[in-house]
Image (cartoon, rainbow, N blue to C red):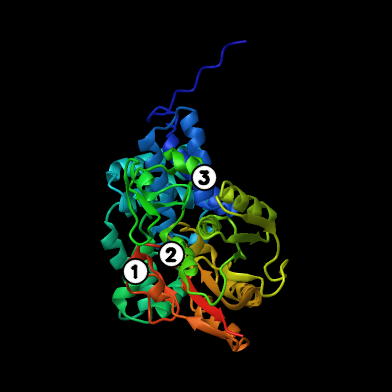
Amino acid sequence: MSEQPRRPRKPGKPYRRPQKDPVRILAFEALRAVDERDAYANLVLPPLLRKAREAGDFDARDAALATELVYGTLRRQGTYDAIIADCVDRPLREVDPPVLDVLSLGVHQLLGTRIPSHAAVSASVELARVVLGDGRAKFVNAVLRKVARDDLDGWLERVAPPYDEDPEDHLAVVHSHPRWVVSALWDSLGGGRTGIEELLAADNERPEVTLVARPGRATREELLGEEAAVPGRWSPYAVRLSEGGEPGAVEAVREGRAGVQDEGSQLVALALANAPLDGPDRRWLDGCAGPGGKAALLGALAAERGAFLLASEKQPHRAGLVARALDGNPGPYQVIAADGTRPAWRPGSFDRVLVDVPCTGLGALRRRPEARWRRRPEDLDGFAPLQRGLLRSALEAVRVGGVVAYATCSPHLAETRAVVVDVLKQHPDTDLVDARPLLPDVPALGEGPDLQLWPHIHGTDAMYLALIRRTA
């Protein structure tokens, strides 16, 4: 049998195996986890980075780039979606999510970093070849070449409606927030274009890592001896790590004598601890203690006065985190798994009570940028009964002359003043305490008697605090 002649090869470039880029593959995997599993980047990324370092694939610069790609893409997702939508020939919802993730990573490199355009496009196309295949890589290449024709300002002029025609939608596209979040934050600020633009811009900044030196266990001076450490702005126990500082490398953090805690969270605990009481100061309660940051600081402050802290958390696994945070506390404390709306304690048992209630988390969008895309206005209705129930239980738990702190990491008026006003209507035996003088060095806390912290003013999460004294 005669041998069949071989077909001549078609002219063209020879096949080239796609080049694997560990940094961009890891960033893609993190974004897929956020999208597919509703995971949070701050929980997904650290184990991925640790695994890459242990495998010898990553150094510190690689880890920094991967972190920037993930968080930068998530923060700017709304803006990038508007730009990509202008460059494709179909509705964005018809683009496969993995393809959209690769495109978003590419757009961030083009418009949000100093990576040269040709390198950003070629790296993204190589990533697409590895994780999507050659066919869809061609689509990624075509879209990103369109994006590369202009810079971010030029694209915003094209895809964002003029401010004068639709200010909320303009801000939503330019600053990458859902329109309803823009509206809610604007209401909380009380109006004025400068304030809202500064706040939205601050939400898109990378937050500093802030440590807390737990009193009686560590000092701020000890933490300031660490590389890249500078004092906090407002809390006497706060230390900020400048870019590149790694909390896990700090001995006091590894030993639990210090912790990672936003300065706004520290200020809430300090305000409650500093509030004047009528009568004894022996028993404190943290009624929503998970994951344990405020409880650990409150426990240390209570120990300095010989007071006892009860830390209660409904979810058993989160109660375990609280117990870990409090382990080694110098004073008496107890951690229990209990529902704060169905108290495991007698009425009037405590002198100071904190309820840092579950909320939408709109005050921590710097740290959890994906939360802005997951939350919906209807989520407020789901949280409202729980927030009111926890505050009512806290007011029943405190004795006459004692103080309750109602706190939430959201500036949304429906989660802050509306809750306090509604509950206090049912409790005429209470008075609001002006919280602002308890933080004398902190400016611009609002009209009072409650207080509101802001990322663009204070460099903290947007924590809200109302202090309430039981009078009868």
Q: Is residue 88 visible?
A: no
Q: Amino acid at mark 2?
A: Leu
Judged from the image, the secondary structure of the residue bearing numbered disc 2 is: helix
Q: Tell me the residue at 72%/70% (across/down).
A: 342
Q: Amino acid at mark 3?
A: Gly
| Comes first in the chain, label 2 or label 3 | 3
| Comes first in the chain, label 2 or label 1 | 2
- With 329 as the anchor, is 145 left or right in this view? left
Judged from the image, the secondary structure of the residue bearing numbered disc 1 is: loop
Residue 220 percent coordinates (x, y): 38, 50
184 up-or-down from 214: above or below: below
14 up-or-down from 172: above or below: above
Pointers 2 and 1 in contact (C-beta within 8 Å): yes
- With 372 as the anchor, is 225 left or right in this view? left
Indicate the quadrant where residue 332 lies: bottom right
Residue designated by label 3: 256
Distance between mark 3 and mark 1 Cα atoms: 28 Å
Residue designated by label 1: 442
Residue 19 percent coordinates (x, y): 42, 31
- Who is closer to the viewer here, 393 or 165? 393
Residue designated by label 2: 267
Q: In what quadrant of the picture does the N terminus appear? A: top right
Q: Tell me the residue at 67%/52% (across/down).
A: 317
Q: Residues within 10 Å of mark 1 (few under 14, many from 20)?
A: some
Q: Residues within 10 Å of mark 3 (few under 14, many from 20)?
A: many
Distance between mark 2 and mark 3 Cα atoms: 20 Å
Judged from the image, the secondary structure of the residue bearing numbered disc 3 is: loop
Residue 65 percent coordinates (x, y): 37, 42
